[in-house]
Structures are given as C-alpha cells and as structure tokens.
Image (spheres, grey):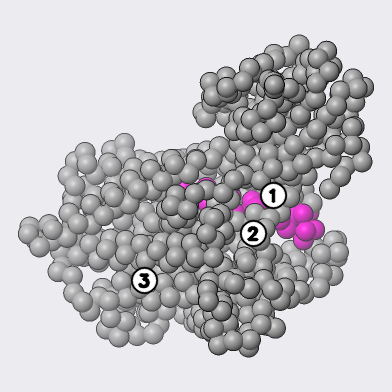
C-alpha cells in the first residue's frame, strides 16, 4: 500500500471507524433492516394491486404470509454470500463470482431494471400523497405528474449531493412511521367492531388460509408475486449487520427480529384496511390506499399525519432505490461490464455521480412516457417489476449453492442452511416467475392494453430481457475483458465458527 | 506536549489554501504535518465493496496530490485516510496524534451540504478541544 510518489515516504494509512457498542448495534440493525423496506410506502404501493388480483379476495394476508418464507430463505443466502465477500457486494458481484460473468451481468441488469421500473410507481405515490397533504384528494393526472417529476429530480439531487440521514434521524422517522401505522390499524379495527362503518367486514381467520383462495394456485401466485415486493430491500440490512462487535450472533438475531416485525406490521395493517373499507376501496385506489381511509379513520387533521408517514417512507424508499442502483452500475462500470464512465465518483460530493444522474434521468423519462401513455402501464410495470425481483432473488439463492458447492456435504447443518433452504426458495421463486409469465402473457391480464397481443406486464418484462441481452452483447463485443472472468468458489474456511452454518459449539 | 498539525484536505481550492498555511506553520515550527482525507461510507444499501474502493482510490490520489504540493517545503508529512465524516475524522485524528492544532479551509464541501447539515469548520470550532485554524481563500 506504500505510495511511491508520496513525499517523505511515510505512506498513507487508513483508519477504520470503531465498532458500535452491542446494544445500540442490535437495535440499529433492526431499524436499518426494516427502514430499507419502507413498510409504509410498500403497503401503500402494493395493497391495492394485491386486493385486485382476481380470485384472491380476502385471502391477501395469506399471500403476504407465504411470501415471507422464500424471502427469509433468500436473506439467508445473502448472509452467506456476504460472509465470503466481507467487502459487501450484492447480486451482481455474487452471481459473477458463482455463475460467471454472463449471469452476473444479467443479475446486475435485473437490479437496474427493477429499480427503474419502481420509480414511476414511487413518483406516482409521492405525487398523490403530496397533493392530498395539501387538500387535493383527487388530483388531475397533470398535477400528479408535475409533483412526481419534481419528486424524482429532488431525490436524485439528494443522492447526488450525498446528503444522508444519520442513523438517529432514520430511527426517529421509522419509529414515527411505525407508530402511526399501528395506531391507524388499531383505531380502524376498533371502529370496525364498535361503529360498523359502511363496507366494513369483520376479520376472519380464513383470511390467512391459502386453501380458502377461490382462484386457487393462479390467484395465490398473483398475490405472491406482488407480496414479494413488500419484502424487497430487506436484504440490504443483512450486509450492514456485520457492523456489530458480537458479529457471530447479532446479525442472525437482528435479521430474524426485523423480519418478524415486518410481517407483523404488514398483516396487522392489511387486515385493518380490508376490514374497514372492504376490498372495493382498495381496488379503486391503487395509488393512494391510505389517504381516503386515513380521513375516514382518523378524521380531519389527524389523517395528515398518516399521509406524512407514507411520504417520509416513500422518500426513504426512493433513496434506497437510487443508491443501490447507482452503486450497482458503479460496480459494473469498475468491473468493465458497462462503460467505465459509470464507475466514476464525483470528487466534490463523493457520490457515484454519473451513475446517479443516469438513474434519475432514465427514471424520469420512463415515468413521463408511462404517464403520458396510460397510468395503467404504471400498474403493469409494477407487476413486471415483481417478476424481475423474483428473478434476481431466486438466482442469488442458486448462486449461494453454486458458490459453496464444495462445502454443502460437510455436515447436515451446512447442507440445510447453505443448500436446502436457499435452494427451496430459489426453486419456489423460479416457479413464481414461470407461472407469472404464463398468467400475465394472456392479452387482457394487465391493466393496460396488450402490446403485440401479449399481456402488458409480460411484454414489459420481455422488452427488458431483450434490452439486457442486446446490451450485454454490445458490451461483450466492445469490452470483452470482463467476460473472460472465471468462476470462483467460496474459500474453504470462510464459515469456520459461523453461528448459523456451523453452530457455536462445534 | 502536543506537537504537529492536522490539516483536512479534499482537493478543493479551500483545502489547498489551508494546506499552504499549514505547511508554512509546520515549517516555521519544525513540526510534522498530518494530512487527512475523511469520508463516511453509507453502508445502508447496494454494492458497497466497489464504491468503497473507488472512494479510497480518490482519497489516495488526493493525498498524493497534497504531498506533492508541500514536497518543496521540506516539512515531514504523514497522510491518513479516515473512514469517518470529515469533522469527526479530524477531531479523532487530532486526538490520537495529540496534535497542536487543526487546520481547515473555510469551506471544503459544497455550500448546500454545509447549510443543511452544518459545515466541517463550523462543527470543528464548536467541538474541538484544540485550537482550530480556519483558512479563507487567498
């Protein structure tokens, strides 16, 4: 690390920050895990669409509950992949190492596609809730579009300049979001039992029963696909978990607790919302599930607090959308998988400047194009986004097995944690993708008109896959170096003493 | 007895001004100059490894540039990359080196950042237990 050009030959030393105390670290890990999912926004974005899945009906909570298991299993795969790569990569690095550059490239592309596809939805929700905050309950398309555009620009600038909320502010914001959602759900449920508001239904245990779904497997699949989105982003907490001093035990426990907390809040709010307003209310307001309900549950004034909570959640979510995408393209740029320009850091702001601006611009264009074509396309982009997420989560599961292939049969415990659990989840997610392709390729399965006779969610997904293949081909011709990289295998000793894979006493 | 000067350097014109003054003081007193580049890595999400490497590369090139700038003065220098927010980095470094003084430019980062979350010199002046020298543009 000595630098030849350094004047007095002293070299450059690097000082790492000190680790946080255990107690604080544990709570922080939970907060980061939950905050990166942005529960308020995720619910606002997803509930309307889940309720609208035909044949799923009141069994939406069942789908949300089932989706939790594969996601938790994939989080386990993330944990192990991260162990071997202490510098914290994600899908792009891992798939490149485990499965080779072609799959790695597609994994990175999937992250970019997912993040770009979610931006119109985020902007739309931010637009709706901002306007409803100022009293415009049913804004015109153009008003929402304007606020949505402003939102994307503002968030891109924030990420470019590198203004980051510190951990404490994040904790406070998340706690508020959380408390408000819980109060909202509890008040709604109390009113359901005491006041019997119009359209209200008493919650029933069958809402959690997947076998009660009228539309059968197809409906469950549609629900699962969207429910996966609810847990999207949860994995990012896993990489931060390394920070605590007691790193053999704390990460696993924090991950588990944050997962349970998430499932709890999702089920509580979903049940409350369905019980209070029935399904029709959810279906007719896919972009602003909470604003009409908030008004009715909380009354005037207090409902603004709920709107604020969703907005703060959406802003956190926009940032955790732009940041990882910019970092993925930075990583790809530095690896030579895409033009080097993407790998540049802006000296003044220390952010991946080019990648950030690029991400913001593409999102902006997509949002305007979709809005100007048909707002229904935003809903279909959302469905197709779920296919993309299922792809890169599923393949991260496969990557874990392939990367650790030499260690799978060393013990039962390793077989179960490294192979069986991630493998089952990966197969399950693959099945969801295949099923989704079959279901959503039917011409009238989407909200928008079919494109070339194919249902618009699948048409969007296919378009993205083709773009990805073309992009990769161009890169392969112009920058072949990256594609010559060899597959790697997990170092033999990386899991020694790991609390999950080996256990403490072995 | 404290000795040596800690100077924050990020490559901006403000930092260059601070570095020039710090080198001059170090030369006069025959003390050592510790040049520091601080950055905080937000680990919250995404591919972190490569971003981290890119930041470190940038920090190295900046520190080498700083060393080249003061090479003619004959001052003994040391360069440190601190993985901390700039203000905290300089405070910690001054503490661990038992430095006589911290030297910074009036404005290293961008003004908007300074206005929203407080500028580095502003924080230093309030938090440091050691003298802080804030150098304006020449």
Q: Secondary structure at mark 2?
A: loop
Task: Give the Cα distance between marks 2 and 1.
Answer: 10 Å
Read off the chain for label 1.
B
Q: How many marks?
A: 3
Question: Do tag 2 and tag 1 residues touch (Cβ < 8 Å)?
Answer: yes
Residue drawn at point x = 49 percent, y = 49 percent: A21
Residue A94: x percent and y percent? 67, 68
**Disc marking residue B52:** 1
Residue drawn at point x = 41 percent, y = 72 percent: A68
- For this view, does A280 lie left or right of residue B126? left
Q: Nearer the viewer, residue A186 or B27?
A: B27
Question: Do tag 3 and tag 2 residues touch (Cβ < 8 Å)?
Answer: no
Vertical position of residue B50 compared to residue A78: above or below: above
Task: Give the Cα distance between marks 3 and 2.
Answer: 29 Å
Predominant SS of the magenta segment: helix
Read off the chain for label 3.
A
Vertical position of residue A194 compared to residue B93: above or below: below
Q: Residues within 10 Å of mark 1 (few under 14, many from 20)?
A: many
Q: Report the residue marked by disc 3.
A: A64
Range covered by the magenta-colored residues: A316-339
Vertical position of residue A238 compared to residue B26: above or below: below
Q: Nearer the viewer, residue A127 or A501?
A: A501
* Residue found at the very far front of the displayed protein: B1
Instruction: Respond whether the residues carrying marks 3 and 2 are from the same subunit.
Output: yes
Residue A161: x percent and y percent? 61, 36
Q: Report the residue marked by disc 2.
A: A88
């Amino acid at each position: 690390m000595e630098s030849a050009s350094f004047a007095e030959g002293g070299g450059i030393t690097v000082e790492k920050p000190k680790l946080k105390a255990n107690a604080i670290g544990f709570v922080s890990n939970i907060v980061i895990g939950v905050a990166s999912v942005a529960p308020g926004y995720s619910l606002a974005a997803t509930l309307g669409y889940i309720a609208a899945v035909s044949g799923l009906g009141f069994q939406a909570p069942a789908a949300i509950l089932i989706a939790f298991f594969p996601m938790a299993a994939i989080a386990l795969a993330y944990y192990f992949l991260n162990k071997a790569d202490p510098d914290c990569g994600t899908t792009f690095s891992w798939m490149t190492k485990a499965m080779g550059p072609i799959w790695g490239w597609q994994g990175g592309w999937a992250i970019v596609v997912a993040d770009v596809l979610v931006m119109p939805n985020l902007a739309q929700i931010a637009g709706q809730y901002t306007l409803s905050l100022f009293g415009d309950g049913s804004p015109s398309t153009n008003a929402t579009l304007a606020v949505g555009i402003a939102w994307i620009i503002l968030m891109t600038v924030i990420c470019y300049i590198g203004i980051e909320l510190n951990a404490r502010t994040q904790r406070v914001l998340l706690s508020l979001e959380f408390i408000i959602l819980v109060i909202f759900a509890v008040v709604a449920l109390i009113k359901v039992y005491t006041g019997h508001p119009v359209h209200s239904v008493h919650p029933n245990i069958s809402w959690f029963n997947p076998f009660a779904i009228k539309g059968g497997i197809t409906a469950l699949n549609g629900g699962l696909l969207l429910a996966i989105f609810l847990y999207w982003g949860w994995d990012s907490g896993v990489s931060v978990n390394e920070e605590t001093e007691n790193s053999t035990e704390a990460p696993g426990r924090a991950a588990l607790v944050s997962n349970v907390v998430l499932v709890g809040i999702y089920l509580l709010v979903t049940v409350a919302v369905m019980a209070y307003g029935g399904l029709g209310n959810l279906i007719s307001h896919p972009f602003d599930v909470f604003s009409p309900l908030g008004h009715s549950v909380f009354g005037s004034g207090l409902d603004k607090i709920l709107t604020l909570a969703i907005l703060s959640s959406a802003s956190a979510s926009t940032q955790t959308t732009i940041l990882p995408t910019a970092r993925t393209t930075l990583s790809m740029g530095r690896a030579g998988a895409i033009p080097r320009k993407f790998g540049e850091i802006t000296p003044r702001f220390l952010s991946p400047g080019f990648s950030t601006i690029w991400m913001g611009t593409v999102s902006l264009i997509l949002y305007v194009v979709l809005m100007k074509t048909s707002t229904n396309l935003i809903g279909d982009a959302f469905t197709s986004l779920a296919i993309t997420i299922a792809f890169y989560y599923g393949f991260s599961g496969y990557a874990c097995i392939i990367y650790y292939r030499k260690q799978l049969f060393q013990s039962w415990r390793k077989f179960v944690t490294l192979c069986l659990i991630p493998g089952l989840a990966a197969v399950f997610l693959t099945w969801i993708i295949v099923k989704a392709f079959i279901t959503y390729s039917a011409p009238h399965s989407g909200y928008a008109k079919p494109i070339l006779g194919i249902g618009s969610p699948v048409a969007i997904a296919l378009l993205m896959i083709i773009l990805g293949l073309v992009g990769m081909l161009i890169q392969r011709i112009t920058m072949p170096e990256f594609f010559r990289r060899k597959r790697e295998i997990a170092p033999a000793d990386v899991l020694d003493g790991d609390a999950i894979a080996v256990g403490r006493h072995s | 007895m404290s000795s040596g000067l800690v100077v924050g350097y990020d490559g901006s014109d403000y930092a260059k001004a601070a570095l020039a003054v710090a080198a001059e003081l170090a030369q006069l007193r025959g003390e050592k100059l510790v040049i520091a580049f601080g950055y905080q890595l937000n680990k919250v999400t995404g591919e972190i490894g490569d971003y981290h490497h890119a930041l470190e590369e940038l920090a190295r090139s900046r520190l080498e540039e700083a060393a080249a700038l003061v090479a003619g003065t004959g001052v003994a220098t040391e360069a440190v990359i601190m993985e901390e927010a700039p203000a905290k980095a300089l405070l910690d470094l001054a503490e661990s080196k038992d430095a006589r003084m911290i030297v910074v430019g009036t404005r290293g980062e961008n003004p908007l950042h300074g206005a929203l979350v407080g500028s580095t010199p502003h924080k230093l002046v309030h938090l440091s237990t050691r003298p802080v020298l804030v150098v304006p543009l020449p």
